[in-house]
Amino acid sequence: MKEAKAPLAGVSRETVERLHRLEALLHKWNPAINLVSRSTLANAWDRHILDSAQLFTLSPAEAMSWVDLGSGGGFPGLVVACLAADLRPGMTVTLIESDRRKATFLQQAARDLGLKPSIIVQRIEEATPQGASVVSARALAGLPLLLSLAHRHLGAGGLCLFPKGANWREEVEAARKDWHFDLATHPSETDPMAVILAVKALSHV
């Protein structure tokens, strides 16, 4: 079994095993649905599982509702649901995914893993506003559009967590033309070129 690196520090052995089952489900389903890039499958544990888990470690301990936008293969949404079941059992986790085939995977994977996230099969901009404590999205859109999508579902005082690559500064500069927000950046533990953007106090310019 792969070691529980920093993003999984403190989680139970059962949760690590559950995450390994999620990794196995990804390998099983990906040839049919293309949940993630095939080039990343060989290193799925670091590229998808741990990369998603680090978002949970950046969320406030008091956050009790999490919405993941464009959940796709369940990253970070299903990983967050796994960790929440162990470390924050009262937290609700909602996955929004408009692609019905990917949503079917999310539903089946959740059942197989013994998780009960809410899965909304709708476009993000059409789903009922969720008022979440935390909104996440991974590889979904550029930051200007991402903030527009997240704003609809973010509760008062809420936090957005978005992994971004080497061009994150340009995305932030573009987003500030239309949005006011407080920003903190955290180095990615899985990619030396990437950061996680932590956005608060989001409002239109």
Image (cartoon, rainbow, N blue to C red):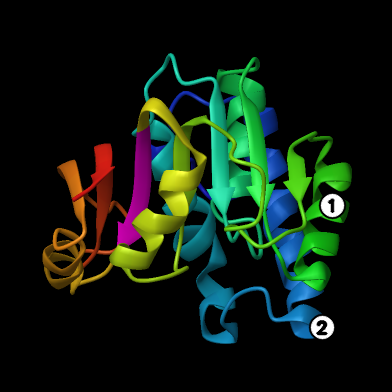
Q: Position of residue 193 (x, y in %)?
A: 20, 68
- Determine crowd level at label 1: few under 14, some 14-19, many 20+ residues with C-alpha closer than 10 A: some
- Determine crowd level at label 2: few under 14, some 14-19, many 20+ residues with C-alpha closer than 10 A: few
Name the residue located 70 percent from the left edge and 30 percent from the top edge: 14
Question: How far apart, in angstroms, are the residues tagged by discs 2 and 1?
Answer: 16 Å
* Marks 2 and 1 close (CB-CB < 8 Å): no
| Above-or-below relation of 42 to 67 | below
| Above-or-below relation of 154 to 88 | below
Residue 32's label in the rendered image is 2
- Magenta stretch, main secondary structure class: strand
Per the image, the residue denoted by label 1 is: 107
Report whether residue 5 is seen: no
Badge count? 2
| Above-or-below relation of 51 to 6 | below
Q: Position of residue 187 (x, y in %)?
A: 20, 51
Residue 40's label in the rendered image is none
Bounds of the magenta segment: 159-164
What secondary structure is found at the residue carrying circle 2?
A: helix
- Image quarter of residue 84: top right
Name the residue located 41 percent from the left edge and 17 percent from the top edge: 61
- Looking at the image, tell me whether mark 2 or mark 1 is earlier in sequence order: 2
Report whether residue 174 is seen: yes
Q: Residue furthest front?
A: 205
Residue type for callout 2: Ala
Residue type for callout 1: Gln
Name the residue located 73 percent from the left edge and 71 percent from the top edge: 27
